[in-house]
Amino acid sequence: MSFPENFLWGGATAANQIEGGYLEGGKGLSIQDVLPHGLKTPPTAGPTPDNLKQVAIDFYHRYPEDIKLFAEMGFKVFRFSIAWSRIFPNGDETEPNEEGLQFYDNVLTELEKYGIEPLVTLSHYETPLHLARQYGGWRNRELIGFFERYARTVMERYRGRVKYWLTFNEINSILHAPFLNGGIEGNPSEQERYQAIHHELVASGSVTQIAHEIDPDNKVGCMILAIPRYPLTPHPNDIRKTQEATQRDLAFGDVHVRGQYPGYLKRYLRDKGIELEITAGDVEKLQHTVDFVSFSYYLSVCEGDGEASGGELMGGVRNPYLETSEWGWQIDPGGLRYILNELWDRWQKPLFIVENGLGARDENLEDDYRIAYHRAHLQAVREALADGVDLIGYTSWGCIDLVSASTAEMSKRYGFIHVDRDDDGTGTLQRSRKKSFYWYRDVIASNGEVL
Ligand code: BG6
């Protein structure tokens, strides 16, 4: 079984991790401007000069060169996010910032030159800071309206030019990283986290409706952090723990796909004494379900009584059978076949792998370990296709080196393209092709026959 014809091969990024130009073109601050060290330290009061994301890899000025390199690899699709704060600098304005809109017009024009399909994330961990600090982030119902206005603005502006949209990046991470995902500071209660996620789900449903109204050809996907969880032992307690944790991961996907809260989540909320404010309007908006399901995949974890996994966000314990990346993430290509089958069986919606990759320290451009990682994962994808999974495409994460989300480092590199920039902010920003660049180019050229 091979990859389908028209399979969308490409790469993925997010505005705050590549663009830089953090105050250029009328852009406002986002929560990333107060996270100079990722998840390692609490948000700062305002921007600080040690934040690598202020310049990132300067995509804001270098996008023509970068897109040309993507085209050289044969990309069919490029995933990027629109920085909400470029379009509505504070998030609550009534009129958009024309210069911000123009920037993405230019990016789209460049992609069109090479016939590369855009895949646009509307909210990728970059809520406008003003909405976080003045409104309390997604805890506040008012954000639904601001997000609707923002989405309508960009969907009208780029009508006919962008077809694939994602609403919230890794929506399920809000339970573990409320500031990054939801712009909620401090240590919100579970009640607040679930209310915030409810607002995001309603906003997502509403924006799906808006997208279809604006252009019936629009395809809207949700985006979940996919993480296979295996029982550490066959003990029934581990089995149950695994099921519960998996349900926690997939609950919001269930809402996105089925348009209502699953029974197990209602029970969980009831048991915890959490009462959500859900209006009749919310119930209606939730019914606008997604066209496809996209997800990120990096690692798997076990559930049971063991040593904490290095999986950063999502908990779980270490799997004794797997190797670990330099950042403690457990590498599990078979987990990708497993999760593709699980998600397809559960939802019967086309799937899209929109992130997958290896963060590693590169000593030089000979990144054989990165090739090995992608090769093994794509072999697993091929198996899943043979299992009958419906898959739209694969965008490798950080197709060009960028600033890491969890640690805000440059040295955690994912790219097929090297960017000369170091953790201390030094470097020429020059781009160079790694060995993996040529490998991925050949994979795409052969539509996955040559891995
Ligand atoms: C995903 C995010 O969680 O993982 C990306 O959507 C992020 O923004 C990626 O960069 C890899 O994580 P990290 O922390 O290695 O950058």
Image (tube, rainbow, N blue to C red):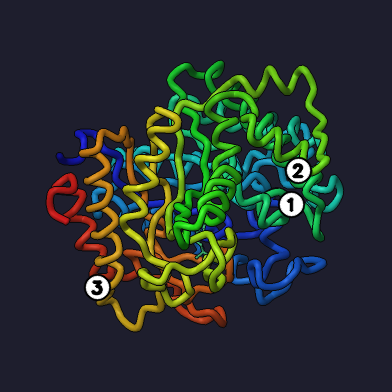
- The image quadrant where one finds the C terminus is bottom left
The image shows residue 171 at horizontal and vertical percentages of 60, 44
- In the image, is residue 73 above or below residue 142? below
Circle 1 — which element?
loop
Q: Which of the two labelled residues, at mark 2 and mark 3, occupies the earlier sequence position? A: 2
Whether residue 331 is visible here, answered yes or no, is yes
Task: Please tell me in which quadrant of the rendered image residue 7 appears.
Answer: top left
Mark 3 = which residue? Answer: 368
* Amino acid type, mark 2: Trp
Helix, strand or loop status at disc 3: helix
| Residue 254 drawn at (x, y percent) | 55, 32
Q: Which residue is at a point 20% across and 39% down the rendered structure image? A: 386
Q: Which residue is mark 1?
A: 183
Is residue 360 found left or right of 35 in the rendered image?
left
Residue indicated by mark 2? 138
Q: CA distance from mark 1 to mark 2?
A: 6 Å
What's under tag 1, amino acid-wise? Gly
Q: CA distance from mark 1 to mark 3?
A: 38 Å
Q: Residue at x 67, y 21 (%)?
A: 285
